[in-house]
Image (spheres, rainbow, N blue to C red):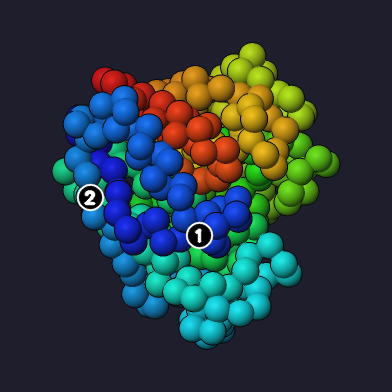
Amino acid sequence: MTLQVYIGEGLARYGFGDGHPFGHDRLDAFWHEAVRQGLDKRVHIAEPATCSERELLRFHSPAYVERVKTLSRSGTGYLDCGDTPAVKGMFEAASCVVGSGLDSLVHSISGEHPRIFVPIAGLHHARKDSAAGFCVFNDPGVLIETLRQEYAIKRVAYIDIDAHHGDGVFYAFEADADLIFADIHEDGRYLYPGTGFAHETGKGKAKGTKLNIPMLPGADDESFHQVWPQLEEFVRAGKPEVILLQAGADSIKGDPITHMQFTPQAHAYAAKRLCAIADEFCDGRIIAMGGGGYNRTNLGLAWSAVLESMLDAG
């Protein structure tokens, strides 16, 4: 089964400048390591794509999209309360993140390339009407809505192993019983955004369709493997039609802004097991997104481990 990976300048442009944790060098840091390991010769490389405003509006409010456009032209101010600065060209760069994800749906759903990896993606903090935590547009949210509206796929599983809770996805779909949400993250008492507690399992008819697994600072691979069977059983019970994986590398030991101590092997294992579930329930359809990760060495190793697992998993 071939794996398609999105690599190109369009995705590299998403970032907030030199010295910022989410700098423009993140894509190159990943791809340099992937090439060093020879993974580039085993994947199908796709050019990043862009999206239309209409597609952004499947998740985001018109007023917010217009605000991003305006501040993107001026390159001044913030798109939220102080974490996400406006930089020139940000609208186009963020639209490329979303557009690459939407393009991946075409190839995955058709069966041409069921397994996809989009490294600069998984911007899981953005809300419908605001940026948050370095995230301008919520590409997972747009993908989920697009799967429903354009592909008639309702049962989507979103799995997140980034150190930060995927709050922008969780609260947008908290009352959506068809969105299977499972998130292993650092306990919100110790890390932004301060959410994702175990009692948050969904609202109304969606109660029980969301799984939050907060981990204490310092949680390592042993801790990861202790909780993974619960997550896997939960996802299997949901019988998804498509799997989205947010594989943030900031849960790896040594990240400058988190306190987790996973190794890349945890990310490799997650990708391997989710590919098996995708093969069982989803005709192999799984789209992995890079997510966070601010130690460049960790980022390269973790995402390359995800690639290798997706290539070797059956």
Q: Which residue sits at x=28%, y=62%?
A: 49
Marked residue nearer the N-terminal end (2 or 1): 1
Coordinates of residue 286 in the picture (x, y in percent): 35, 39
Residue 184 in which image quadrant: top right
* Image position of 219 with respect to 213: above or below: above
Q: Is residue 247 left or right of residue 201?
A: left
The residue that disc 2 covers is 46
Label 2 CA crowd tier, 10 Å (few <14, some 14–19, many 20+): some
> Looking at numbered disc 2 in the image, what kind of residue is underneath it?
Ala
Q: Camera-side residue: 198 or 177? A: 198
Q: Is residue 201 visible?
A: no
* SS state under label 1: loop
Q: Is residue 122 above or below residue 60?
A: above
Residue 290 visible to the viewer? yes
Q: Is residue 12 above or below residue 82?
A: above
Crowd band around label 1 with a 10 angstrom C-alpha radius: few (<14), some (14–19), many (20+): many
Task: Label 2: state its secondary structure.
Answer: strand
Which one is in front, 74 or 288? 74
The residue that disc 1 covers is 15
Whole-angstrom CA distance, mark 2 to mark 1, is 20 Å
Labels 2 & 1 near each other (Cβ < 8 A): no
**Residue at 58% across, 43% down:** 294
Residue placed furthest toward the front? 18
Dot 1 amino acid type: Gly
Asked if residue 30 lies left or right of residue 9, the reply is: right
